[in-house]
Amino acid sequence: MLKAFLLAAGLGTRLAPLTNNIPKCLLPFAGRPLLDYWFELLADAGCLEARVNTHAHAGAMREYLESEFPAKYPQISESHEPTLLGSAGAIAANPDFANGASEVVIICADQISDVDIAAMLDFHRQHGDPLTMLLYRVNNPTECGIVDVDADARVIEFTEKPQFPKGNLANGGIYIVSAAAYREIAQLRQFDFGFDILPRFVGRMRGWTWAGVHRDIGTHTALAKAKLELPSVVKTIASRTEAQPAIFLDRDGTLIESVHYLTHPSQVRVMPDAAATLRRFHLAGYRCVVTTNQSVIGRGLLTEDGLRLVHDEMTRQLAEQRAWLDAIYHCPFAPSSDPAGIQEHSHRKPNPGMLLQAAGELNLDLSRSWMIGDTDLDVEAGCRAGCCGSLKLVATTDVNIAEERYAHRYDNTHCVPSLTAAADLIFQKVSQPELPCVAVGSF
């Protein structure tokens, strides 16, 4: 059985004031706690049990660790440290954690990465060494643990933060160790992995080099760079799994209150049931993706940077309620006003371009996906994309009338009064599947 130990107890002082009230490893990336990305990576690698050490803002971390997670995530436990024990000391405080494990993945969790843990595990098992260390190239070798390897990737030299580095191949803070090596590390009862543990394994550990995204978030500059790399991380992680179902959501009138030509973050108000509904969908294994027409850009009322600020505020409000979106797609073009009826841009709903782009980039299974919105454009876009169903949000008093109207236009398209009702209906339909929605008329 594969287990994981995530080192997440650090103070994060260099990231103040962001870390004044929240652990560094819970900082939101697109509204999603950093630690949650690691749990997904571990789940995809087949990890069944994970332990997280805590210290700074332990109450907030404990609340998060005790919340609900998707069924595929590892079973999660906490190791609280009233006094910081260090990266090696955390292992020493949990000597029995390797019991029943084939290997333990030890992760410094204050990083953003698209690392393929399953591939690293295969490398570790093929070579049979007690420890395998993730390596990556850095621009600041004097601030890292620098490694030299031979032709067989065996580590022949390791120096923590060298004054005169021989190269830039660095310790990436992810280790796969055998159960016996884990116990050996625990018995050493040392403080720091880089200074106290790794030098003892030189000659009997290997380096596995990762060329993808792998970035420590310890400073404000590093954090900003990591957030810019997040879309790439999300797409890479998604590409390695089986295609996932998605919930596509319109923005205005669906996730947030409808404001005519919304142009400022102060106008953003998330719907009362938006966060809870997103949490339900994520727990059930759906990706949650916004697809929104934003003609305010094409009309010259808002810039792309301005729209980013609006979406940052929407993301912030959702994150306050422990909810997030996997991606946001927008079409900036205004509708055509040409009397000859020039074809609208392929991404502007009711065309399915945004949904098709998301499906390609995020590895989504459209045949198991749903569209939720408050206009006919949303419903038609979902059906044109090949979603298994589309739901339109309407006033409670109009549900029956609207439902009858849509029955003549699309199969498996329904009208509901709220996001909560939409989720209820989707889960009901998934347990009793119907045919994908097919156009039987036109708007």
Image (spheres, rainbow, N blue to C red):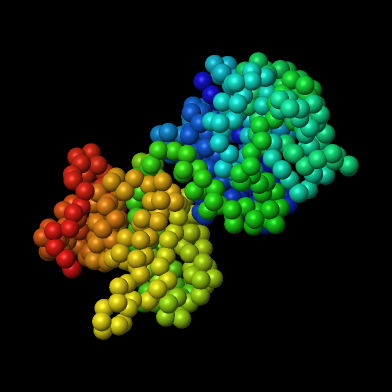
The answer to whether 238 appears left or right of 133 in the picture is left
The answer to whether 97 appears left or right of 377 in the picture is right
Q: Residue furthest right?
A: 164
Check the image and report above or below for 353 versus 226. below
- In depth, the one of 388 and 276 nearer the eye is 388
| Quadrant of res 165 | top right
- In depth, the one of 171 and 189 nearer the eye is 171
The answer to whether 299 appears left or right of 197 in the picture is left
Q: Percent x, y for residue 21?
A: 62, 51
Name which residue lies at 44% across and 51% down.
Answer: 361
- In depth, the one of 146 and 109 nearer the eye is 146
Name which residue lies at 67% across and 46% down.
Answer: 216
The answer to whether 386 appears left or right of 30 in the picture is left
Q: Percent x, y for residue 13?
A: 72, 50
Q: Residue furthest bottom?
A: 339
| Quadrant of res 336 | bottom left
Q: Percent x, y for residue 415?
A: 20, 58
Name which residue lies at 66% across and 32% down.
Answer: 208
Check the image and report above or below for 48 versus 56. above
Q: Quadrant of the C terminus?
A: bottom left
- In depth, the one of 190 and 225 nearer the eye is 225
Q: How many marks?
A: 0
Q: Residue furthest front?
A: 151
From this viewpoint, is residue 321 visible? no
From this viewpoint, is residue 299 visible? yes
Q: Percent x, y for residue 8?
A: 63, 39
Name which residue lies at 44% across and 38% down.
Answer: 241
